[in-house]
Amino acid sequence: MSSRPHLGFERDVAELQAEIDRLLELADRKGTDVSGELRELRSRLERLTGESRWSLSAFEKVQVARHPRRPYTLDYVERIFTDWIELHGDRAFRDDAAVVGGWARLEGAPLMVVGHQKGRSMKENLRRNFGMPHPEGYRKALRLMRLAEKFGRPVVTFIDTPGAYPGVGAERRGQAEAIATNLREMARLRIPTISVVIGEGGSGGALALGLTDRILVLEHAIYSVISPEGCAAILWRSADERERAAEALRLTAGDLEEFGVADEIIPEPAGGAHTDWDAQAEAVRTVLLRHLGEVTRLGARERGPCRHGKYRAIGAWRHGGGT
């Protein structure tokens, strides 16, 4: 992960880290004591990463959420769950690799895991359609959720997509209907459901896996009805206004918590989830276990009204100085 690309606001951190690496290499080669210099540099690095963590603009958080080295669904599956068995296909058209799902165990307890999946290489991204599902991806997800309900097992979803694929073929095969059906059926599920927004939560393509009892959002993840670029193109007729659009959309984790969309924000390591996959997975695991325990303790009769009440209460209109 040391060869990961750096975003503009990461350059100072990257340069300082490179300086530390060079100093360590010099000490190893010449056998000199550089502990004093290392202490100073590491102190500066910690200070810098802490400052950048809290000073990111909304669009910079969008960039972090899209970081190509950020962990994806299968990276979390590998680190959080055991006994993973992936299931394929929607039983109607084909298997959509932009959505993955299957049985797994969390602390020994079986559950169903479903999530969007992007690729690392160009070849894999083409196979997974850059994490943008076709309708069969959402139909596969719903098939797996119904299977989990049949056996009375919880469902955990991982959300990370720019949005549902808007291609002609996807529209012909009922993209809007597939998303709408997922929303309706997820609202009716009698089993515990939890979603974790791990990167981009783009439009209905994200919501089709996100209508759950609890919504957990990583610190630098985003969740929005439209991308900043799309919003800027519509409102200002120019994608160059994407930073302005990102601020207006209120798509950051803090905004989501304020509006009652996010039930909890999961902290990220200094520098973002892409800097330490293992630490991030452990943070997700800890919070997920707690919320899963709370939701599971509710009976099916209580769970439905709680879920419906959550979504009825989300959001508020603001105008002038009031709410």
Image (cartoon, rainbow, N blue to C red):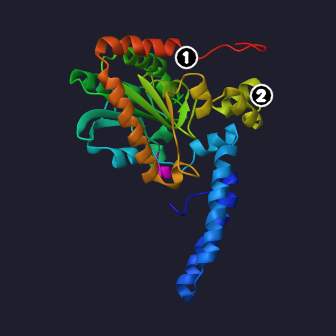
Q: Is residue 285 left or right of residue 217?
A: left
Snapshot quadrant of residue 33:
bottom right
Kind of residue at badge 1:
Ile
Task: Give the label, 2 or 1, closer to the camera.
Answer: 1
Q: Residue at horizontal 74%, vertical 13%?
A: 322
Q: Magenta residues?
A: 119-123
Camera-nearest residue between 113 and 46: 46
Give the x, y percent position of residue 17: 61, 66
Kind of residue at badge 2:
Arg
Q: Which residue is mark 1?
A: 314
Quick check: is 120 in the magenta stretch?
Answer: yes
Q: Is residue 164 left or right of residue 114?
A: right
Q: Which residue is mark 2?
A: 237
Give the x, y percent position of residue 318: 71, 15
Give the x, y percent position of residue 165: 51, 30
Snapshot quadrant of residue 252:
top right
Asked if 176 appears above or below 47 in the picture, the reply is above
